[in-house]
Amino acid sequence: MNAPFKTSRVSRRAVLKGGALTVGFALAGMSPRALAQGAALAGRVLDVKEVDAFLSVNGDGTVTVFCGKVDLGQGLRVAIPQIAAEELGIGIDKIKYVEGDTALTPDQGRTSGSNGIQRGGVQIRQAAATARKALIELAAQRLNMKADDLVAADGEVRPKAGGAGIRFADLIGGRRFDLKLDPKAPLKDPASYTIVGKSLTRPDVPAKCNGSHVYMHDFTVPRMLHGRIIRPPAIGAKLTSVDESSVKDLAGVKVVRIKDFLAIAAEDEWTAVRAARALRAQWTAGSGLPAQDRLVETLRADPDSTLETLVSKGTPGGPRPQGAKTVAASYFWPMQSHASIGPSCAIADVSADAATIWTASQGTHGNRNSFARFLGLPREKVRLIYLEGSGCYGMNGHEDAAADAAILSRALGRPVRVQWSREDEHGWDPKGPPQLLDISGAIGSDGRILDWRTEMWIPRTTRGLPNIPLLAPEAAGLDDVRGLNAGLISQNGDPPYAANSVQVVVHWLKDAPLRPAPIRSPGKPANCFAVESFVDELAAAARLDPVEFRLRGLNDSRGIEVLKRTAALMKWQARPSPGADVNAAIARGRGISYVHYKHNEAYVAIGMEVAVERASGRIKVERIVCAHDCGQIINPDGVRAQVEGNILQTLSRVLMEEVKFDSSRVMNVDWSSYPILTFSETPKLEIDLIDRPTLPPLGAGEAACTPVGAALANAVFDATGVRLRSVPFTPERFKRVLAGRPA
């Protein structure tokens, strides 16, 4: 067994000297300052083509892993060290871990799209394999043996036949490898794994349980001020005047106005809060938002949209055989908040020639360019350091809070901490965009899909900076980087099942009513909700069992397996939907949904069992089962937690989450008006993980989000005969649809 690892916190003084600002694996007894100073190696190599960018063998026998991806709560702090330790041949207790610091870690891209493991981890695995090969070759020279007769294990290279070995530290400790990543460096046989594939404990959990974990919100630096931003009363409003005398009775308050950017700063947080409430300012009227109750019509009628064909196969609308049935339906997914339980927070220390910014952003390296640009600094003079926040899964207010702090710090010449309020977070974080999908299709008498057409209306959105304009630089008239693009929001808009002809087109809308941003699994939950609901509608029209219908059109063996496993867990009895219970006061039903995520990543099938109270419209999800295939599993507990989180977060979005706005602003800016799923509403979960150790890891951070909405809609239809095509599935919406009124 490997020795247990423990968490270590870096001291503030060590941080300001340039040390690592992350929780890491550390040997028992190693001081935080020693860990920090050990990570801050002089002249760090940051080129992702170099082994030294990712790994450093230290003189004490430990190995530091430098990861550009960050742990948002998904467990990378244990999974990435598992990968590195396994491939290098050292115990995980000997691994130190540094993440998301632009001065210390290589740029591995934004932590998004379930790519922490499938790209970031795989990159580090190859670096470790290259390093292991080099260490064996060094030892072969020292021992005068053939490299093939040696093995790297337990932090040393030793003869396979037995005998004394040489420690990694004695071979290269404290020195660089000076090696390019070798794509041909042999990887270990998964059959020999002793670390990867094990459910090792996350190192951050103990501190999170006892309250000692340092989140972004807990972090402080000397001499820092506390800042608050004063937002306009209406979106698009311009600042006309500020009455600074309104805060003259609050000691030490500084008012900062740069064009339409208005903020205050104070020595303590409570004074800053009071000053933000007291400061009087005048604003123009806002730019005006469209009527929410006509949002679907507004999206369809956008005169500035551009049309793109994404999929075109066969001849849509061709002659259909006798007995074919046609179906058409529209589906809508609303704007939603990230709804992070902790409002966003950041600290910035900006001088005339350099900037250091502590942020919970998923994209420290990518954001560096944007921050350098609007601060007017060279890129190499801007350092962003990741500290864990309250989670975002896309882009909530973390980047905005960091920009707020940076602009205030530059104006005041001191470090500034900006803490958003709950009203800030719900009112001003960028929103998951609205999505409208029309689907039409035909099914033959043999139960096979003849043709399929998906037509989408989607705002142009993105996966993160520099493409989403930040509030503060925009208000201050600074040089911000922008230019929205489509991102990956249109994926999974076509069926994974065989069809004679398929066409998918998208109307890219010029804008959204509210500032759009990616939210967990961008676009795919809405697309899969529409596609898999429509598949169920086709099955119902053909009077076929929903599982049987899917299996008829599915040719991918891995997809077939997750569907069959989910059905087996549910003890699925074949029959068409809806069931015989539709008129019961409390009707019960089951539903199923499937996705091959992005058509090239994880395979997921989800089944739900629900009870619907017809009189009240209340939907209770009683049980959820999920079969999940993400290829090689690094840490089963970590994957299980990710899948559970995906399902529950999306269940909350489907049942109750929708941003409400009037002509000026977001209206639901607290938890009573924007409710999320509670512990008492959590259903029974059963997760079946399919491990494929010889196949590439595909990531588990997003895929299980996507089938949730359709599985629930299909279960409600099976129970009641009522088809819900608009999210969220509130009691009021169910009763409207039941009564035949517009949803």
Image (cartoon, rainbow, N blue to C red):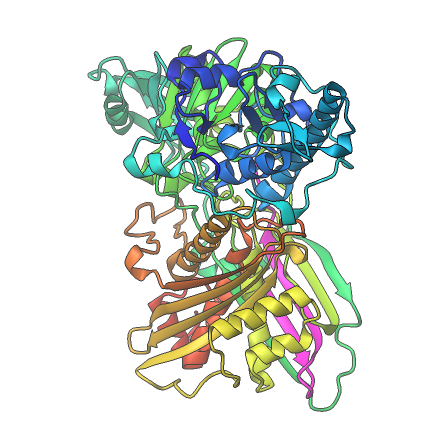
Q: Give left or right: position of 35 versus 127.
A: left
Which residue corresponds to the image point at 43% horizontal and 66% vertical from the top-left? Answer: 624
Q: Residue furthest bottom?
A: 322
Residue 432: percent from left, percent from top:
49, 49
Q: Give left or right: position of 209 versus 394.
A: left
- Does residue 311 sit above or below 469 in this rendering? below
- Does residue 732 sit above or below 419 in this rendering? below
Q: Give left or right: position of 572 versus 618.
A: right
Query: Quadrant where the C terminus lies?
Result: bottom left
Marker count (numbered) = 0
Q: Which residues are magenta?
A: 435-464
Is residue 389 in view? yes
Whether 437 is among the magenta residues is yes
Is residue 537 in view? no
Residue 720: percent from left, percent from top:
41, 80
Residues 285 and 502: in front is: 502
Residues 373 and 589: in front is: 589
Residue 267: percent from left, percent from top:
28, 16
Residue 660: percent from left, percent from top:
39, 52
- Does residue 305 sit above or below 18 in this rendering? below
Our reading of the magenta stretch's main secondary structure is: strand
Which residue corresponds to the image point at 67% horizontal and 79% vertical from the top-left? Answer: 442
Residues 218 and 239: in front is: 218
Residues 243 and 378: in front is: 378
Q: Residue furthest left?
A: 249
Whether 698 is among the magenta residues is no
